[in-house]
Every structure is written in C-alpha cells, then in structure tokens.
Image: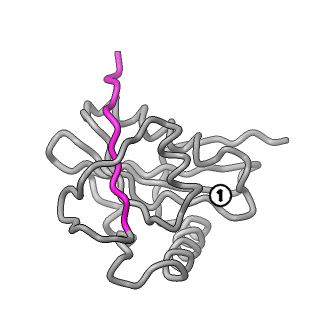
Amino acid sequence: MPAVTISLEPPRQPAVLRLLDLSDAYAASLYPAESNHMVDLSSLEQPNVSFFVARRDGDVVGCCALVGAGDGTAEIKRMFVDPEARGLRVGKLLLEALEARAGELGYQAVRLETGIHQPEAIGLYRAAGYSERPPFGGYQLDPLSLFMEKAVRQAA
C-alpha cells in the first residue's frame, strides 16, 4: 500500500479545490448555513496560515490548515479527507503534522470548531487529546457546534 505523505503546499491547486468543494457540500448536507464556519480560499492563503496537503501515490487525499489567531493560539480549519481515502489514517497524519507545526511556531494551544454530526472527526480529536471548551474568537454558542482545544508541546 502506498504511503501517505503530508507537506506544506499552497491551497490554490485543482485537486485541493476539489477537496474543498467536497468539504463544502458535506458540511451543507449536515448543517444550516449559519452553523457552517468554513473559511474561503483567500483566507487560506494568508501569511498566518500553514496549509497541509496529504498525498497518496501523488494524489491529493486530504488537507487542513493551521490558522494563527494572533494571541498565541491557532485554529484548525478545513480539515477534510477524501471519502475514497477514509480508513487510511490520513486525518491522524494531518493532525500530527499540524500539531508539530504549531509547536515549531510557538503556539500555546490549538483550537477547533467542529459539528456535532461528525462523530469520526470528534473521535479523532478526542483520541488526540483535545478537550471541550467554550466558544472562542468570534464564535457564538451554537447547539450544532463543538469547540475543542489542546495544549501544544513546544518544539525543542
């Protein structure tokens, strides 16, 4: 089985745009627009963003972004794995790469918002040590949202 590789890459490439479109459609199938907190492509191209792409045999199979909040923390955005690649631990590998990058950049914590109808994502985050917390940043309390956080180990 070909190995999955994770690297920092620009988000503006056709295979990544396809994943972002799949992610949008998936979220829209689960939640009303007011409970979808996606960021657009231009937001993923900002200097405070580290964008990760997972590839298997050269094909893009997943992505995620680490977005610096300017307060010593960062947020996970746009974590998505191609349905065809589920079960290959792509999400876990992306999360590990993202957390390592957070440590390199000196963030104290990584935060996220995910939806309550995504048990696989919630399970991934809980297994990685994320715990629930109140809304942060510009988020408001939403019965369809779950907010989580994990302290970051600083890079040596």
User: Residue 99 appears in which quarter of the rendering?
Assistant: top left
Residue at the spot x=58%, y=48% of the render? Answer: 91
Magenta part of the protein: which range?
145-156
Q: Residues within 10 Å of mark 1 (few under 14, many from 20)?
A: many
> Residue 128: percent from the left, percent from the top?
49, 37
Check disc 1 and give the amino acid type: Val
> Residue 45: percent from the left, percent from the top?
35, 61
In the displayed structure, does residue 89 sit left or right of residue 20? right
Residue at the spot x=49%, y=49% of the render? Answer: 52
Residue at the spot x=16%, y=47% of the render? Answer: 70
User: Residue 78 appears in which quarter of the rendering?
Assistant: bottom left
Q: Is residue 138 above or below residue 155?
A: below
Which residue of the protein is positioned furthest toward the right in this rendering?
Answer: 1
Instruction: Check residue 155 for magenta coloring.
Output: yes
In the displayed structure, does residue 52 sit left or right of residue 89? left
Instruction: Check residue 149 for magenta coloring.
Output: yes
Residue bearing mark 1 = 60
> Residue 57: percent from the left, percent from the top?
76, 49
